[in-house]
Image: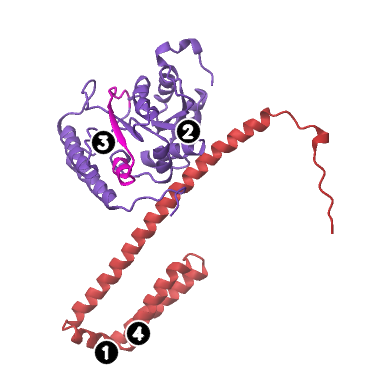
Chain colours: A red, B purple
Amino acid sequence: MIWTQTIVLLLLGALLLGLTLELIRKRRLREEYAVLWVCTGLMILVFAIMPGAILSAAEWLHLDRGVLMTFLCFVFLAAIVLHYSVVLSRQAGREKALSQELALMKDEIDRLRGEIREAPPPAPEAKPKPPALRT
Amino acid sequence: MRYDHEDIPESAQLDLRGRRALVVVPAYNEEDAVAGVIRDLRRHAPWADVLIVNDGSADETSMRARRAGVTVIDLPVNLGIGGAVQTGFQYAYAHGYDMAFQFDGDGQHRARRLADLAAPLLAGEADLVVGSRFLRPRGMTARGLRLVGIKMLCSAISAVVGQRVTDPTSGFRGAGRRAIELFAQEYPQDYPEPESLVLMWRQGLRVREVPATIRRRRRGVSSIGAMTGIHYMSRVLLAVLMDAVKAPVRLEGEVA
């Protein structure tokens, strides 16, 4: 029983780590988030190798092992979702600021273009000579 | 700036005492209304420059506005009313305007009445002036559930800011220099009209309401219409309460 659990957890942890590394390799996952998943994978491996840890923690808290595991999973998922909500809010703010900046700059470019078109061509002698280099 | 000077009635003139005014018109798919709105502004508020903020329209809003001879800012994506209006404030701030007015692109506001908003700003009596439909009810007002919702919202915002507010959802308003600076940097996204009142209070700026009437909208639907009564109100209330506890914004120019 305990051996099947260890093997399943080991496979799961290894799979998660492998997948994370593969995603990094393909540049589909930023390191910022990769750290989170590498840590998660390592945690699973720790639980796989030391199944006693979770048992003694459950005993210490006077909780059933299953209840403790469910609780930990819930906290973990809630923390990740909250983190993503924060990231999404930040992204929305940045996206808005970028759109506004872009739109305002487009207008500025149009205005400058108009000014250049209307300005008289510069006299050829007005072209400043590059200053002589002194060494 | 191509328009008939003879066409402007004498009464439309307003002495700005050397200050510059901008009317920001957020427009999302308003190709049928936008030219009329510009004509109204040119005729009845010739003392203000006009800026159309095209909020990622899929129709000919931008082209028709440009053809009418005003400056158009084209947002690359649809940001919603809050983001569009804020872009207008950013433009006003960058170009050194002393007053910036918000004016709907669907033709429900009257350009003639902009002078009422400008007066307290020119006198230095307020940083933000809001045209209220309910201070002296005339013309179009709200009915039924919508009215109940607005009343409750009024009570809540009045309680938060400690000042009587009668029309928190009014999008007919004018901002002075300090409000322009604030809004250029920080402007609410979800329910900008009521939320900005709380933001103003949070920053210690002065809000003043003046009576205003609006027209029955000729085209398009209210951004509020689909979410009537209780749902809209509870969302706004939540947003307003969240605004009330947010830390004040430190403006870029200020010393820490």
Q: CA distance from mark 2 to mark 4?
A: 63 Å
Q: Chain of mark 1?
A: A
- Mark 1 is on which residue type? Gly
Separation of marks 3 and 2 at Cα, in angstroms: 25 Å
Which of label 1 and label 3 is nearer to you?
3
Could you tell me if residue B69 is visible in this image? yes
Q: Residues within 10 Å of mark 2 (few under 14, many from 20)?
A: some
> Residue at (35%, 80%) from the top-left corner?
A43
* Label 1 packing within 10 angstroms: few (<14), some (14-19), many (20+): few
Q: Nearer the viewer, residue B150 or B120?
A: B120
Q: Name the amino acid, label 2.
A: Tyr
Q: Dot 4 corresponds to which residue?
A: A46
Residue B97, numbered label: 2
Spatial CA span between label 1 and label 3: 61 Å
Tell me if label 4 and label 3 are in contact, CB under 8 Å: no
Q: Position of residue A103 (x, y in %)?
A: 50, 40
Chain of the residue under the numbered disc 4 shown in the image: A
Horizontally, residue B164 falls left or right of residue B120, namely left
Q: Which residue range is magenta in the image?
A: B196-219
Question: Label 1: which residue?
Answer: A52
Residue B147's quadrant in the figure?
A: top left
Numbered disc 3: secondary structure? loop
Q: Which mark is residue B168?
A: 3
- The answer to whether dots 1 and 2 both sit on one chain is no
Labels 3 and 2 touching (C-beta < 8 A): no
Does label 1 or label 4 sit earlier along the sequence?
4
